[in-house]
Amino acid sequence: MKVKSKGMMGIGALIIFIAIILIAAVAASVLITTGGSLQQKALITGSQTEENIASGIEAMTVVALDASATDATPHRVGDFKVMLRLQSGSQGLNLNNTILTVDTETASHSLTYNQTIGNDGVAASTQAYVVYYIQNGTNHENGYLNRGDVAKIIFKVDPEITENQLVRIKLIPRVGTYTQIEFYTPDSMTQESVSLWPT
């Protein structure tokens, strides 16, 4: 009887041992699947974060036009050109998804891209900006800002901006960081072309 009892206990221990192994295998499988899913999500999130941080526009100069064309005192400017390019390491940007805002002490403007290719002149509308490409990169395409492209954004604001007034210009792409340019207009604006930024 003792031998039979020991045999039954051995079989029971073996069954329990096999059950523990199966439970451990299932738990390991769940952990591996969850770990793989989390890793994939982390890679996607990291890639999106890197794109948002790295992508953006670098402003180079801001110029206003025709300050000398008005008889008003103080002189006023309403036509602007912003020269820009992509930040180093940035992905190409779609100008259709890029908003330009101009804020002054008395007014706020929000402009969208006009698909009509601009010329190096004056924008016709206060609702949209046009783009004139000065230099085309290897992957140049109208309506986009790609590596190697240098462009002028041309726009108009109304009411016009007077002397010694704070101006904030923002370029806000759908993906990436926005670019802010802040400056005061000069105390004296009498030239046909007035350099506003950098000072």
Image (cartoon, helix red, strand yellow):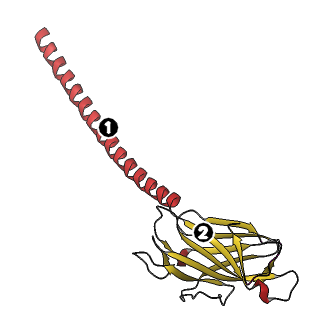
Q: Position of residue 52 (x, y in %)?
A: 51, 60
Marking on residue 60: none
Cα–Cα span, label 1 and label 2: 55 Å
Of mark 1 and mark 2, the one earlier in the sequence is 1
Residue 41 vertical placement versus 166 (above, below): above
Label 1 Cα crowd, 10 Å radius (few <14 / some 14-19 / many 20+)? few
Q: Look at the image and give the residue range highlighted in magenta.
A: 185-192
- Report the side of 114 relative to 164 (left or right): left
Q: Is residue 1 visible?
A: no
The answer to whether residue 118 is magenta is no
Quadrant of res 44:
bottom left
Residue 105 vertical placement versus 6 (above, below): below
Q: Which amino acid, mark 2?
A: Ala
Dominant secondary structure of the magenta stretch? loop
| Of labels 1 and 2, the one closer to you | 2
Q: Position of residue 69 (x, y in %)?
A: 78, 89
Q: Which amino acid, mark 1?
A: Ala
Q: Find disc 1 in the rendering and name its residue.
A: 27
Identified at 28% across, 39% down, the residue is 26
Nearest to the observer: residue 83 or residue 126: 83
